[in-house]
Amino acid sequence: MTNNHLSTSTYSNQELGWKGFYQQQLTLEDYDNTVFARVVAHHRSGYVLWSEQGQITLDIHSSLPAMTVGDWVILNEQHQFVRLLDRLSVFSRKAAGSKVARQYIAANIDTLFIVVSLNDDFNLSRIERYLALANEADVEPVIVLTKQDLCSDADEKRQQVMALDPMLMVETVNGLEPSSVEALSSWCKTGQTVAFMGSSGVGKSTLVNTLLGQETQLTRGIREDDSKGRHTTTSRSIHIMPSGGVLIDTPGMRELQLTDCEQGVSETFSDIDELAQQCRFSDCQHISEPGCAVQQTIEDGNLDERRFNNYQKLLREQRRNTATLAEQRANAKEFGKLIRTTMNDKQGRKNRY
């Protein structure tokens, strides 16, 4: 088991990340014989929550809304679910594989650490994908480049990442060295919630262990044939760091399909959006149209063609997934109406006889 080391300590709401945003949602009745709790782990059988009264478990039930690690809920005195508080931020994706569904990743995050390995797994397009997710959620992204000790051109790769956005925060670390990881401390203060996301085997578990000061997550070595790490973390969980920060660890993602993320993609590629406004035609597809400012900038060498191709790819992907999910929701709604109509008709016939 990799992440069942959930603390039995009791923390105040503030230590668990409680903010005025959640306070503003409360009514006078919400203070009467109730418990405020945060979801710290999600298993197949139920949720684990922390509160000022200690650890609480909630069994999965059809009456519960879809929740994820980081959510804040109100419970009654018997620790039964009352309601889910509105989220300050939420991360989700299209479920991996062919399944047509939205999968929540984590909620109520202040800073997203996008963990990327500096070895052969380094990939700018993947970084842009995670940035789109962060920008859609309106969460500050920080790029954390790991395995500095295994890379001979770390500075060059760091410059490549910074070229994506001059305002982007980028830190290069050796996850095994506490003094190196100290660069992340300003985002990990008491009550601040940070989440770590990245592909499988980028050194995320090693980084988490160093920040927590203990072997909370199992780690495994690098495969020699392709320099890729091995997947270790298998579920999402919350931990309190010695610094007081709230840390959400997530499994490595082999597939991160975007959905409902058009604003996040546009913000991530704002330079291309601004260029598109200068095209001669408002409906320019940026392929071969005359007066295309985007293609002209690529030809001038001032826009990386890889970046432009990834921009178009992510836009197409999120549109396709969003449309598919919307169609699924519409079909489910129509099916529900059909069931209710059928039941009402049966009841009506029954009452006539």
Image (cartoon, rainbow, N blue to C red):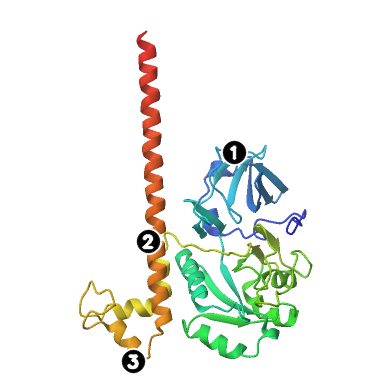
10 Å neighbourhood of mark 2: few (<14), some, or many (≥20)? some
At x 37%, y 23%, the residue is: 344
Q: Which residue is mark 1?
A: 61
Mark 2 or 1, which is nearer the eye? Answer: 2
Q: Which mark is residue 319?
A: 2
Q: Which residue is mark 3?
A: 300
164 lies left or right of 266? right
Instruction: Give amino acid for label 2.
Output: Arg
Above or below, comparing residue 333 to residue 243 in the picture: above
Dot 3 falls on a residue whose secondary structure is: loop
Give residue 244's position: percent from left, percent from top: 70, 67
Nearest to the observer: residue 247 or residue 265? 265
Looking at this rendering, what residue extends furthest in the top direction?
Answer: 353
| Residue 269 makes an appearance in the image | no
Give residue 247's position: percent from left, percent from top: 66, 64
Q: Check whether the beta carbons of the residues at disc 3 and disc 2 lie within 8 A of each other.
A: no
Instruction: Give amino acid for label 1.
Output: His
